[in-house]
Amino acid sequence: MPRRRNPENAGLPRRWQHTHGAYYYQVPPGLEALWDGKRKFRLGKSLPEAYRTWADRLGQQDAASTVRDLLERYALEVVPTKAPKSRTENARYITKLIAVFGALPLAAITPQMVYQYVDRRSRKDDKGHGGRIVAHRETEVLSHAYTKAVEWGYIARHPFKGEVRLQGEKSRDRYVEDWEVIEALALESRRKKGSVLAIQAYIRIKLMTGLSRSDLLRLTAANLRDDGIHIQRHKTAHSTGKRTIYEWTPELRTAVETAKSVRPALSPFLFCRRTGAGYFDEETGECHGWDSMWQRFMARVLDETEVKERFTEHDLRAKCASDAESLERARALLSHADSRTTNRIYRRRAEVVKPAKGVG
């Protein structure tokens, strides 16, 4: 039985190791000449750098014969192109998939196997691991890996695309009422600058623009131009490349100026830390400092106002879309390419319908 991997190495390809602040490849005996004569080859300090070095060293991969081979090439070539948070999650999903399917020949996967896997993974274990959403995400990675297998010429057709129809996940339906927003915006700040005033300015801008958290926290002076706020959605910058200009209104200008005035330091970012740095960590895709501020703010809202149910930043984005006068207007505000996404996930307000004319 192979030795259990240390937690810091979980999710890494075989023979990879993270130690002394860098990623290393433990070269198989007899292959040292291919790796500069070293038994342990340094790949890089960061995970993206390590993947690039690994891919450069290996060049074109040999033909995959097993699911493990496919998933390891997928981890090397596809995962590094994704957002930081997706890279971390995908590495974890691939570890689980290899444990179950790794030894199987590529052509051996059937739709029935995928259904059985989802059914088993949907049941959380004693530690709370697993669940339906995780099972779906893992299956999405496996499916995309097989799509790449067709592209790479390993197989002629995808073995379960269109054959596996998983039960959809229920979209969140929390609609934030106007009075709840008013209560949150009326929360008293204990300082002239700082988190409460910054978050209140943030809420105002979000409700007027529908900007996502990642796009709002990335806003800098360069985005604030004479004709409005210019953005290119970070999430789709490398796919649709869609750009949006939110034209200035007196209310939007006031909210932006307020955000500037309550910053704890001079900074190019509209929302910043005390050091002037932005909240968004481009390496990890996280913004823990901002998330902590938001949680403290919401705790005060629930404790000091009439609001009884917590709402998220995503709920406020949905409120912006829900309150728009039309679906097309909501789509434009959220900078979506497809209005079906806007309608399915973000239009949450109850639809008002006039009753039909009665008889008699």
Image (cartoon, helix red, strand yellow):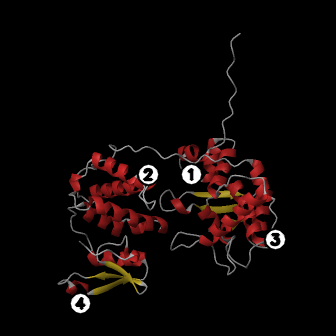
- Mark 2 vs 1, N-terminal side: 2
**Residue at 32 percent of width and 48 percent of height:** 116
Residue 210 point in image, percent of width and height = 65, 55
Question: Depth-wise, is mark 3 or mark 4 nearer the camera?
Answer: 3
Residue labelled with disc 4: 37
Determine whether, in the image, residue 145 is placed left or right of residue 28: right
Residue labelled with disc 3: 190
Residue 349 point in image, percent of width and height = 66, 42
Q: Distance between the residues labelled 3 and 1?
A: 38 Å
Q: What element carries label 1?
A: loop
Q: How far apart are marks 2 and 3 (CA)?
A: 43 Å
- Disc 4 residue type (three-letter): Gly
Question: Depth-wise, is mark 2 or mark 1 nearer the camera?
Answer: 2
- Determine whether label 3 and label 1 are within 8 Å by CB: no
- Tell me the crowding category of disc 1: few under 14, some 14 to 19, or many 20 or more residues within 10 angstroms, Cα based: some
Residue 336's disc is 1
**Residue at 48 percent of width and 62 percent of height:** 238
Q: Distance between the residues labelled 1 and 4?
A: 52 Å
Residue 236 point in image, percent of width and height = 51, 59
Q: Quadrant of residue 139?
A: bottom left
**Residue at 66 percent of width and 47 percent of height:** 175
- Disc 2 residue type (three-letter): Arg
- Disc 3 residue type (three-letter): Arg
Q: How far apart are marks 2 and 1 (CA)?
A: 27 Å
Q: Is residue 180 visible in the rendered structure shown here? A: yes
Q: How far apart are marks 3 and 4 (CA)?
A: 63 Å
Q: What element carries label 4?
A: loop
Q: Is residue 249 visible in the rendered structure shown here? A: no
Residue labelled with disc 2: 132
- Mark 1 vs 4, N-terminal side: 4
